[in-house]
Amino acid sequence: MKILACTEFTQINSGYSIYMREILNRLNRVPGIKIAELASYCSQDDQRMANVPWKVYPVAPSRNDSKAVEEYHANPLHAFGAKLFNDVLLDYKPTHVIDIRDSWHIEYQFRSPLRPYYAHVVMPAVDAAPQHRTWIDMYSYADKILSYTDWGINILKVAGLNNVFSSASPCAPIEFSPLTSEQRAEVKRSMGLGDVTIVGTVMRNQRRKLFPNLFQDFAAYLNKSGRTDVFLLCHTSNPDTWELDEHLLENGLSNKVLFTYHCNRCGTVDFSFYRGIFSHCRKCNNMSSTFTSTQNGVDNHTMNLIYNAMDVYVQYAICEGYGMPLAEALSCGIPIMAVDYSAMSEIIHQAQGTAIKPVDFFTEPETGRRMAMPDRNSFINGLDSLLSLSKEKLIEKSKFSRLLYGMRSYDETAKVWLDALSSCEPSKNWNSSPVKYNMDIKIPKGISSSAFARWLITDVLQEPKYIGSFLEARLIRDISNGHAYRGFDNKYYHEDVAGKGMQLVPFDREFATRHFGALLEERQMWEDKRIASL
């Protein structure tokens, strides 16, 4: 079995990369399995590739190649591996391709002209319901679908997918564990803090992470409780989505919210009130201390210290595909709070943490997913209840939650992946005989939109698997209307609803025939390249 893992580079410390690193390390030890990695956020001159025990195909070009860098940034899909994917397939010739990211990260793998030559096992981040119909249609063509949670499994099954395999939940890496009370106090002292109470959160500064609401509701808690010894600690990215400094000023929290700063030069991490995007490092005194990010993260040992500085952990988000910081906080023995929706519900109820009730739901216009808005009073009352406990009671509660959630192992999660991979195989071998597609396309006259759509699928694209699919239904609609929503990479297969407004493009019969003819030519080109690669 030859596995190509499409992933964020396994040497960085994002949630996706940590999960994939843990899984691949275990699969790599299985006899008969060979691994390669198509690594996003890894450049051709990244020296960390030497630390990886399998072959790495870097997605980003060398920083010194200005022309390649310009081309790389010209299309947002290039960062996910879309530009290199087919070339990597021909070079490595995997039997299986895997990915664990969002739909817009993995879409190109479904429409690859070389799709028959690899089995496809994916674990998309099912973070809200319902999942968009074009995603469900796309997922239906995977050989096996995994999910981060049982909640996600149910959402996919209710949507009608019959290729759903199992959940393969993340776990906290072994470096995450509770420190003693004395050690936690020392962590706070080392960060310049006294005997204070820390409410912490680890969330990237994204639209779905509700930093403005968290700041506003934390300020309301402080006003209600009258506590002066409670601070909010945010381990986040900046600049990104929210203007963090403005929201601090709006809520009078400039001296009540701490952030982690990480020095790009010496690696020092410290807690500080907001001091700008860049600031002096307190150790090396260079202007090199900044917020963390996907490519400027801290290692697990340091993250363990950050979690252990917290007295309570809170996840304030409209949805989550899993919410790995919740599991990491639990492994560090920190009581957790989270919005009672999507994957967060599964974790918060399993651990009997403090659930923050949604006050309402709203529908995201781009995707049609229902998102939860947390109830301010539920958060304030829940936090007040937790912080009214003695330190001993709080530690007791955290131990109970940790026990209920269970000390899970990536060994078990990797076994689920191995079972899923072993249950499927590609429909064709890379050494299969050449395929020559019929390029003699004659446009039929006087037929219905329905018949014309089917002709495009069977005679032009020559992909009968799309008969009866959502793609066929879209074709009938779009040919009848004379326009279509723009697809990924300007190709028709899947509508692009990844965080932007839907864009209409012309789509009459003549345009559709030319477009599908070009897709067929592309398939033939890559088929010819496959034969040449043998």
Image (tube, grey):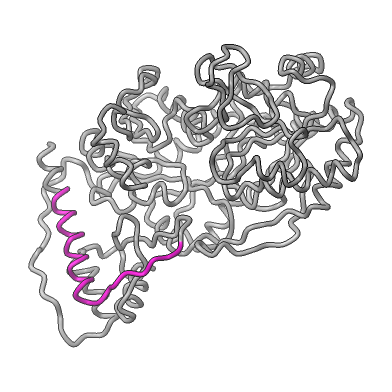
Please check the rendered image and state whether residue 310 is part of the magenta-colored stretch, yes or no.
Answer: no
Measured as percent of width and height from the top left, residue 52 is found at 39, 21
Which region is colored magenta?
Answer: 501-526
Measured as percent of width and height from the top left, residue 133 is found at 46, 64
Dividing the picture into quadrants, the one containing residue 354 is top right
Is residue 330 visible in the rendered structure shown here? no
Q: Nearer the viewer, residue 117 or 137?
A: 137
Taking the spot 62% from the left edge, 51% from the top edge, the residue there is 319
Q: Height in image: 447 above or below 224?
A: below
Is residue 177 visible in the rendered structure shown here? yes
Q: Main secondary structure of the magenta part?
A: helix
Q: Nearer the viewer, residue 400 or 55?
A: 55
Q: Height in image: 123 above or below 520?
A: above
Q: Height in image: 387 above or below 523?
A: above
Left or right side of 406 for 27:
left
Left or right side of 101 for 33:
left
Taking the spot 31% from the left edge, 65% from the top edge, the residue there is 466
Left or right side of 273 for 46:
left
Please check the rendered image and state whether residue 512 is part of the magenta-colored stretch, yes or no.
Answer: yes
Seen as rendered, the residue at the extreme bottom is: 446
Measured as percent of width and height from the top left, residue 140 is found at 41, 58
Quarter of the image that includes the C terminus = top left
Quarter of the image that includes the N terminus = top left
Dividing the picture into quadrants, the one containing residue 34 is top left
